[in-house]
Image (cartoon, coloured by chain):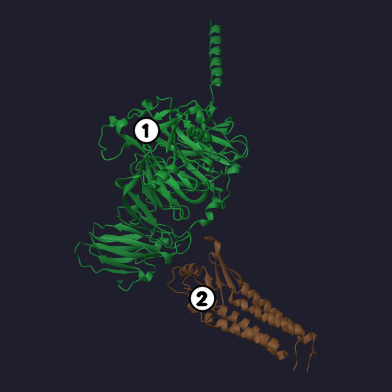
């Protein structure tokens, strides 16, 4: 059973604790601009909530037949916090347990969660952008309004941007940190502290 | 003979040419140099100052930007405004109630911005109704009239609404003296005996801005024209210009111009407060309206008040002193230090500047030249700081900058004259086009002027703008006062007839501007705070439509069961919570106006259908791409018919 460098364990512990920030800062943001909204509209996605100009965005979306956005429609807001708690717990356990396979498992789990989250977000975006009310006032043939997964997209008179908010950036840094230390453990210190 | 004739013709022709070239040129007033760049506010950029300009006989208050002169708003105050529904909606009708009943119009002369420690605080803007005496308070977060109080015992509210250093009081002095007390049915010729002046002190609640008439001073019978409160050392005093000390009641232009000097009345209002605290005030039966607009219920209430406390200054001679001032003074302006009081005799050849310190010394030494109705008249020379010699013709009003200079408007010679308050030396003069009345330096009446510009508000424009028939625009002119010489930068037309105006830096209020009314705070009794609450209810002949408006439909938009003879109240709630998305509402044949409903607000339009049929209604404010679809129908059945009361939106079930 391969053990971990002390520095690795400290980084893993810090990275895990950094994820606590997810409860205090927004994870993702969607920003929109239009000629009528030079100041922009924003929607912030938190671990269990949506904030920002959600009502205004919903009111505008009804023209093109998109569904009204409500927090209660997303079961994710119910369980996302448990997933994050589990990730934090697993990370701290890895730092304590001091086993390389645990680190590998943690990394795989973290990356898989990240991908799952993006896929989930994409599917919601797809659903919102495509499943439109056929009786909507404005129907543009062939037009879908799926927001960008990451980046900027023009949707009729709106320029929409989607990207990580503070919490998202924290997760990105955490992910990069644990992948980096795992790589170091495997390639730089292959023989270290083996029992 | 022929040659002499030719010589004669040539001489006449040359004489004509020479004479013609000697003919004085009319006024030109072309701006010089970089004037355009100094007033250019690029598209999308903000102006540096808000300029609140009274509308005079339009009864409203206009809001311009400076230095561009662009018009932003015309705030309805004392006159109905069919555009916004002011005075037409059920909610705003009580704002125009008076003891004489509902009055749709008045004449607004003077704005006054609230101050703290003598400096602009950007909270409220007051305005006077000159004809049916009233004072209004406009809230500078909503730019709406929040309160109107009627002034009893007043014959025309001209010396108003000037304010004290910390907005403790707004003053309202009567222009006309009138018979007061129990018997008011007296011969006009009994002026001297029966006519009295009246000065009201309106207390302003420092938290809410709510006004109440704390007390009135009963004063000798003549005309009270303009006024300013003391500040700094003179805080606690008020100064009023008085004319017609001749006590004429007919042909005043002759009969009220005879005396060599009229008065400036100095009022020690702190002393008046002391007498009131000792219970010396007398309660009088009166009747006046107090109207308040509530932002939560989005409705106004009007209350009649029936008592006022009066102090007769003839009984308390240490409240009031007269200072002689040449020839029918108009402006009575206090400089930023609070030490100097400028009297502007409309017909006088000199402009006296009085010293507050000297007035106090004269009072201590009883340095009086006599009395008027028992009120001491201070000796002119004892109160005088000095006279501005040969200032111009027809001085009216004076504003100040922060550098110790005064700017006085001259109606007859149509100019602004800049002079030094201490040395009384004339520094500069510029023509105005034409016949300036009031003028405004941003912060000019405060303890801390913002300076930079002086704006002239002119009575005559003649050839300055494209002609528009017999009725021409009034105008404002913007001058830079940053250099030693005043420089004309811009002419801009104004709506109504501007009298006084005030200006303050935009930074003081622009970030406090309200964008929406939160729908959850809407306490209007007929609000429908969601489409599910939209409904129609009948109570006898009254039909209440609880309607909602949101981009781009009205709920309900099909209403049946209305009968001829009904009073139909459309209570429209704007469900939007987004800035700059008002909705409007109008229905065919309504004999009042439209209503404009701001986001989160409820407003009510009363409609009395007269004939059976189907009547369209629609949103009048171009709110969205589908604004033109925002419409509906109301079916009117004959009186006494049994058409059931029905309402819906989006219900096409009954389509045939």
Is the C terminus of chain B in the top left, top right, bottom left or bottom right quadrant? Answer: bottom left
Q: Is residue B619 above or below residue A178?
A: above
Q: Contact (CB < 8 A) between labels 1 and 2?
A: no
Q: Is residue B323 left or right of residue B219?
A: right
Q: Which sits in the foreground, B274 or B411?
A: B274
Q: Is residue B513 visible?
A: yes
* Total count of labels: 2
What color was chain B assigned in the picture?
A: green
Depth check: B627 or B77 in front?
B77
Q: Read off the residue under disc 1.
A: B222
Viewer-nearest of discs 1 and 2: 1
Residue B461 location, x and y as percent?
Answer: 47, 35
Give the colour of chain A: brown
- Which subunit holds the residue at mark 2? A
Q: Percent x, y for residue B103?
A: 32, 47
Do discs 1 and 2 belong to a common subunit? no
* Residue picked out by circle 2: A128
In the rendered structure, the answer to whether residue A23 lies left or right of residue B280 reads right
The image quadrant that residue B324 belongs to is: top left
Residue B470 visible somewhere in the drawing: no
Binning the other alpha carbons within 10 Å of mark 1 as few (below 14), some (14 to 19) or many (20 upward) gives many
Percent of width and height locating residue B107: 38, 42
Q: Which label was assigned to residue A194?
A: none
Mark 1 vs mark 2, CA separation in Å: 76 Å
Considering depth in this image, is B206 or B406 the residue closer to the camera? B206
What kind of element bears circle 2?
helix
């Amino acid at each position: 059973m391969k053990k971990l460098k002390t520095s690795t364990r400290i980084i893993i512990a810090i990275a895990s604790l950094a994820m606590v920030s997810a409860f205090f800062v927004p994870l993702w943001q969607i920003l929109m601009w239009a000629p009528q909204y030079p100041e922009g509209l924003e929607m912030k996605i938190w671990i269990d909530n949506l904030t920002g100009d959600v009502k205004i965005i919903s009111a505008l979306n009804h023209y093109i037949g998109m569904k009204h956005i409500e927090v209660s429609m997303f079961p994710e807001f119910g369980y996302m916090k448990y997933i994050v708690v589990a990730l934090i717990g697993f990370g701290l356990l890895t730092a304590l347990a001091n086993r390389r396979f645990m680190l590998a498992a943690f990394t795989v789990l973290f990356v898989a969660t990240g991908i799952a989250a993006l896929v989930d977000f994409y599917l919601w975006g797809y659903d919102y952008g495509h499943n439109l009310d056929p009786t909507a006032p404005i129907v543009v043939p062939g037009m879908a309004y799926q927001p960008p997964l990451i980046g900027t997209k023009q949707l009729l008179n709106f320029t929409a941007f989607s990207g990580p908010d503070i919490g998202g950036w924290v997760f990105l840094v955490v992910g990069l940190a644990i992948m980096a230390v795992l790589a170091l453990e495997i390639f730089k210190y292959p023989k270290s502290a083996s029992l | 003979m022929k040659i002499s004739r030719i010589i004669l013709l040539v001489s006449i022709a040359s004489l004509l040419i020479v004479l013609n070239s000697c003919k004085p040129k009319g006024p030109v007033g072309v701006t010089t140099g970089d004037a355009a760049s100094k007033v250019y506010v690029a598209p999308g950029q903000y102006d540096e100052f808000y300029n609140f300009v009274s509308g005079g006989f339009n009864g409203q208050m206009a809001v311009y930007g400076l230095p561009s002169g662009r018009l932003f708003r015309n705030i309805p105050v004392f006159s109905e405004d069919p555009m916004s529904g002011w005075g037409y909606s059920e909610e705003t009708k009580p704002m125009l109630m008076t003891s004489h009943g509902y009055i749709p119009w008045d004449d607004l002369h003077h704005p006054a911005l609230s101050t703290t420690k003598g400096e602009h605080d950007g909270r409220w803007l007051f305005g006077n109704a000159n004809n049916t005496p009233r004072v209004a308070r406009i809230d500078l977060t909503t730019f709406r009239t929040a309160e109107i109080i009627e002034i009893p015992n007043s014959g025309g509210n001209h010396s108003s609404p000037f304010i004290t250093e910390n907005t403790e009081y707004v003053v309202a002095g009567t222009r006309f003296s009138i018979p007061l007390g129990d018997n008011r049915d007296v011969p006009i010729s009994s002026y001297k005996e029966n006519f009295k002046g009246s000065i009201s002190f309106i207390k302003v609640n420092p938290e809410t801005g709510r006004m109440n008439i704390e007390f009135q001073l009963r004063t000798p019978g003549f005309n009270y024209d303009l006024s300013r409160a003391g500040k700094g050392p003179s805080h606690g005093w008020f100064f009023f210009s008085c004319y017609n000390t001749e006590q004429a009641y007919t042909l005043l232009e002759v009969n009220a111009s005879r005396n060599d000097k009229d008065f400036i009345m100095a009022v020690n209002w702190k002393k008046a407060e002391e007498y009131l605290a000792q219970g010396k005030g007398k309660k009088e039966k009166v009747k006046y309206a107090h109207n308040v607009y509530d932002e939560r219920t989005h409705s106004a209430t009007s209350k009649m008040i029936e008592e006022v406390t009066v102090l007769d200054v003839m009984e308390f001679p240490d409240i009031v002193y007269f200072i002689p001032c040449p020839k029918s003074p108009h402006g009575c302006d206090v400089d930023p230090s609070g030490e100097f009081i400028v009297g502007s005799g409309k017909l006088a050849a000199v402009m006296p500047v009085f010293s507050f310190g000297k007035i106090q010394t004269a009072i201590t030494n009883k340095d009086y030249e006599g009395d008027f109705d028992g009120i001491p008249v201070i000796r002119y020379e004892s109160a005088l700081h000095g006279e501005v010699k040969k200032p111009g013709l027809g001085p009216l009003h004076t504003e100040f900058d922060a550098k110790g200079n005064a700017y006085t408007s001259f109606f007859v010679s149509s100019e602004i004259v800049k002079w030094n308050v201490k040395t009384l030396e004339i520094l500069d003069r510029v023509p105005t086009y034409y016949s300036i009345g009031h003028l405004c330096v941003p912060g000019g009446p405060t303890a801390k002027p913002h300076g930079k510009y002086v704006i002239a508000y002119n009575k005559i424009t003649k050839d300055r703008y494209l002609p528009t028939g017999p009725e021409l625009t009034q105008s404002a002119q913007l001058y830079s006062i940053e250099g030693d010489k005043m420089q004309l930068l811009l002419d801009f037309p104004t709506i109504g007839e501007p009298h006084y105006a005030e200006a303050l830096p935009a930074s003081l209020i622009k970030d406090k501007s309200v964008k929406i009314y939160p729908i959850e705070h809407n306490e209007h009794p007929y609000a429908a705070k969601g489409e599910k609450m939209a409904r129609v209810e009948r109570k006898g002949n009254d039909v209440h439509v609880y309607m909602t408006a949101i981009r781009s439909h009205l709920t309900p938009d099909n209403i049946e069961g209305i009968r001829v003879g009904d009073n139909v109240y459309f209570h429209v709630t704007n469900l939007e919570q987004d800035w700059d998305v008002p909705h409007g509402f109008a229905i065919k044949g309504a004999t009042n106006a439209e209503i404009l409903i701001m986001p989160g607000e409820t407003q009510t339009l009363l409609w009395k259908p007269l004939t059976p049929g189907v009547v369209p209604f629609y949103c009048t404010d171009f709110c969205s791409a589908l604004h033109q679809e925002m419409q509906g129908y109301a079916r009117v059945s004959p009186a006494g018919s049994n058409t059931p009361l029905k309402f819906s939106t989006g219900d096409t079930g009954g389509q045939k």
